[in-house]
């Protein structure tokens, strides 16, 4: 499945570093999402973009900064992260959020982040 | 509120055994229901879905029926294979909303 790609697949960073995660979808979808998957916790929605506009921020700390330059690309800029931010970050896309039959979300492989 | 509860794992079965992973939900609106699967080291893959009551989703030998009366969406497979070993997530999406609500996941291990 190569509909949603994410780079890098693995990332190790120090607490003072700045890095970015990239997501690209090749499905012609209009909505993109960032999720966080931590050990022993349910998947957490972080951000939603619909037609390039941010429509949801799920109380995410400002050290995570999303960017959506177009409907196919989504970035997550990281700065001054904490060790507890170590997790698998998953990107997803859907055709139209919340519309029956078009709301199915398709996920990328994730970026496994380790903050030292 | 909206929530999903899955059976506690891990679940360990022998090859060719029958599988059931229970999933129940609470929802304030009319949810669509999903099963996603996560193989080791990978992201989530959509396994199947159902968008209204009594719909049956099916894929790769897996099935789940949307039961509104029991607010359930149990995952079943008649004969599991070693390659089915993964973590399975039940999820709901309220129509008109953007947020998938996931269960905690059930780890399945199939032994040869």
Image: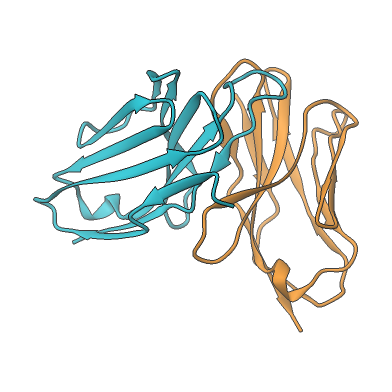
Q: Nearer the viewer, residue A16 or A94?
A: A94
- Give residue B99's position: percent from left, percent from top: 54, 27
> What residue is shown at x 70% (from left), y 39% (from top)?
B34
Residue A44: image quadrant is top left
Colouring used for the render: by chain
> What residue is shown at x 61% (from left), y 44% (from top)?
B103
Picture layout, residue A84 above or below residue B39: above
Q: Is residue B14 left or right of residue A22?
A: right
Q: Is residue A95 left or right of residue B18?
A: left
Please identify which colour was used for chain B in the image.
orange
Q: Is residue B34 left or right of residue B63?
A: left
> What residue is shown at x 69% (from left), y 29% (from top)?
B26
Q: Nearer the viewer, residue B93 or B45?
A: B45
- Give residue B53's position: percent from left, percent from top: 86, 27
Which residue is situated farthest in the bottom direction here? B112
> What residue is shown at x 36% (from left), y 54% (from top)?
A87
Report the number of numbered marks. 0
Screen quadrant of the C terminus of chain A: bottom left
Q: Nearer the viewer, residue B81 or B14?
A: B81
For the colour cyan, the matching chain is A
- Give residue B96's position: percent from left, percent from top: 62, 15
- Give residue B44's position: percent from left, percent from top: 57, 50
Picture layout, residue B69 above or below residue A10: above
């Amino acid at each position: 499945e190569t509909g949603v790609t994410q780079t890098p697949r693995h990332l190790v960073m120090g607490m003072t570093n700045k890095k970015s995660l990239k997501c690209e979808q090749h499905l012609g979808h209009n909505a993109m999402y960032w999720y966080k998957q931590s050990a022993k916790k349910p998947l957490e929605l972080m951000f939603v973009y619909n037609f390039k506009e941010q429509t949801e921020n799920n109380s995410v700390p400002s050290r995570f900064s999303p960017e959506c330059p177009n409907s196919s690309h989504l970035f997550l800029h990281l700065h001054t992260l904490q060790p507890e931010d170590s997790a698998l970050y998953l990107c997803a896309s859907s055709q139209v959020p919340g519309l029956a039959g078009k709301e199915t979300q398709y996920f990328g492989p994730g970026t496994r982040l380790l903050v030292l | 509120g909206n929530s999903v509860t899955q059976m506690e794992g891990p679940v360990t079965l022998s090859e060719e055994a029958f599988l059931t992973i229970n999933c129940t939900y609470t929802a304030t609106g009319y949810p669509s229901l999903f099963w996603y699967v996560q193989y080791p080291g990978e992201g989530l893959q959509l396994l199947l879905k159902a968008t209204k009551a009594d719909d049956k989703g099916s894929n790769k030998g897996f099935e789940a029926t949307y039961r509104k009366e029991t607010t359930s969406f149990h995952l079943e497979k008649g004969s599991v294979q070693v390659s089915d070993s993964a973590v399975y997530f039940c999820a709901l999406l309220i129509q008109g909303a953007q947020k998938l609500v996931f269960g905690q996941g059930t780890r399945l291990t199939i032994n040869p």
